[in-house]
Amino acid sequence: MKPQPALIDNTSTRSASYPTKEFKNLLSQNYPDIYKNLNFKQKPTCYVIPGLIQSAAIKYTPPGQGQPGIAYDMDPQGLAIIDHKYLIISAYSKSKTFDSVLWVLDFKTGRFVKTIALNNIDHVGGITYDEDHKRLWVATINQEQRAQVQSVTLKEIEKYNFKKQKKPIKFEHGTNLLVPLRTSYMTYHKNKLYIGYFDKVRGGQLFAYKLNKKGLFKKDKMQDGLALPSENWSTYSQIQGISFDKNDILLSTSYGDFNSQLLIFKNKLNKPNYNLDLSEADKAIILPPYME
């Protein structure tokens, strides 16, 4: 393939830190156990995170509030895979000067596709795709500073064109949550949204919200307009990400520029009084920092 231009619609597509070869060398030196287990026959071997040099976005502060602009301080926070067709990376503006964005990459090639502008300045670290109902969920905060989740369909994602529309994408559905007060991470699994809260010192919390047949929150599971979870568990502190395998739960711990951990648990969430504490983990793998 021909290399992509350095900029596509005001969003950078080149690596902000290291060329791929240098990145692999550093990885092999500092994390040899990880490096030897990577599958370099699979393409792409790794993805370049776009938009770190500059990104198209909506201006949040005056002058130019609400207008398209260029952000130079975007901080990636979460990712989701859409039907093995797209890789979505969420990011927010550190200075709160610009609204948050979603970067869309081609899953099979790693090439940058487009930027999706959002209409909020939230961290948007919680992001997940419901493959059963073709809906992307993004964790945001409402006007009362309470946690909420909003969704947009795959059809709308593919149709959206920031360059032409010059405005943020419209979320299709939004639901305010009773708990947690802030959403740190989120994933979809078997018709439930699992939503967690990060605590850097004390243990955190994980909540399960059961969805209806349409993949939306159940109206009969509301209290004062806030969605009620069906289950909850205590977790280890510093949890920043979650994923489910066939029989396992994977939790990532990350805080600052220290090594991250990937904690692997046998899925015992249906067991009474079961919690996702460090002592319950079946395996812990040391990984590089910032593994949100």
Image (cartoon, helix red, strand yellow):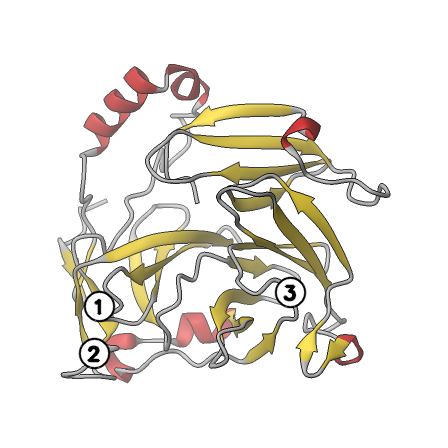
Return the residue nearer the eye: 121 or 134: 121
Q: Position of 12 compared to 267: left or right?
A: left
* Mark number, residue 68: 2
Q: Closer to the camera: disc 2 or disc 3?
A: 3
The answer to whether 36 is drawn above or below residue 63 in the figure is above
Label 3: few (<14), some or many (≥20) within 10 Å?
A: many
| Secondary structure under the numbered disc 2 in the rendered image | strand
Q: CA distance from mark 2 to mark 3?
A: 34 Å
Q: Residue at horizontal 41%, vertical 16%?
A: 36
* Mark number, residue 167: none
The quarter of the rendered structure image containing the C terminus is top left
Q: Position of residue 179 (x, y in %)?
A: 64, 65
Q: Position of residue 168 (x, y in %)?
A: 34, 79
* Mark number, residue 179: 3
Label 1: few (<14), some or many (≥20) within 10 Å?
A: many
Question: Does label 2 or label 3 sit earlier along the sequence?
Answer: 2
